Image (cartoon, grey):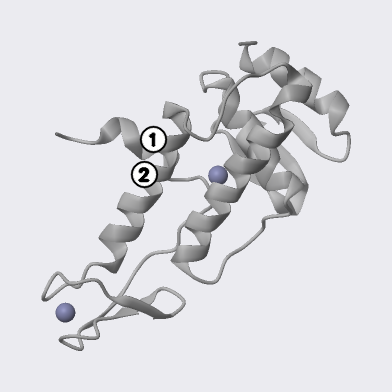
Amino acid sequence: MPTISSLSRTLQSAYPQFIIMPGEITKWTPTLATIYFSPDDEPLTLLHEVGHALLGHNSYQRDIELLQMERDAWHKAVEISPAFQLNFSISDNLVQHSLDSYRDWLHARSTCIDCARTGVETTRQHYTCLYCRASWRVNDAKICALRRRRNKKTP
Ligand SMILES: [Zn+2]
Ligand SMILES: [Zn+2]
């Protein structure tokens, strides 16, 4: 596995339509057509962000779409990986951890505040419980901003 910095240089020459540069966290910023990477992150997370970039991901309307975008970005990363001599698949631990953190996030947001059943996101950031009719609001979330949560999980 190359370092994230050397991978960034290879990716930059392969995808000149994007700017790939070091940053505080690894993320795709559509408005600037820029992919930032943290030198401490796994190289594959950078490939994942390139996946978001290639798919033109820029916003989502429902939480469930964010999970789908995460899955799609990983599939794209796997698809382009052989061109960069990287060998990984969707069953890779890193990928599954990342997707799990989104599933946990989605579960936490959709759990009814009153009866703990699963609610429905009726309009953007608003959930309603179909059983007890409770409704609640959730915060905005950015693409990939959740990945770092997995280390903070308490047993
Ligand atoms: Zn309820
Ligand atoms: Zn992502």
Q: Can residue 23 be seen in this view?
A: no
Where 87 sits versus 71, above or below? above
Looking at the picture, which amino acid does disc 2 mark? Ser
Looking at the picture, which amino acid does disc 1 mark? His
- Disc 1, SS: helix
Residue sticking out furthest to the left: 115
Q: In this view, does 132 lie to the left or right of 25?
A: left
Residue sticking out furthest to the bottom: 133
- Please give the residue where the numbered disc 1 appears in the rendered image: 97
Residue 101 is labelled as: 2
Where residue 142 sits: x, y (%)?
51, 54
Where residue 136 sits: x, y (%)?
27, 77
Judge the density around disc 2: few (<14), some (14-19), many (≥20) Cα neighbours within 10 Å.
some
Where residue 17 sits: x, y (%)?
87, 40
Q: In this view, does 22 lie to the left or right of 105?
A: right
- Disc 2, SS: helix
Q: In which quarter of the image is residue 152?
A: top left
Where residue 133 sits: x, y (%)?
20, 89
Q: In which quarter of the image is the N terminus?
A: top right
Mark 1 in CB contact with mark 2 (< 8 angstroms): yes
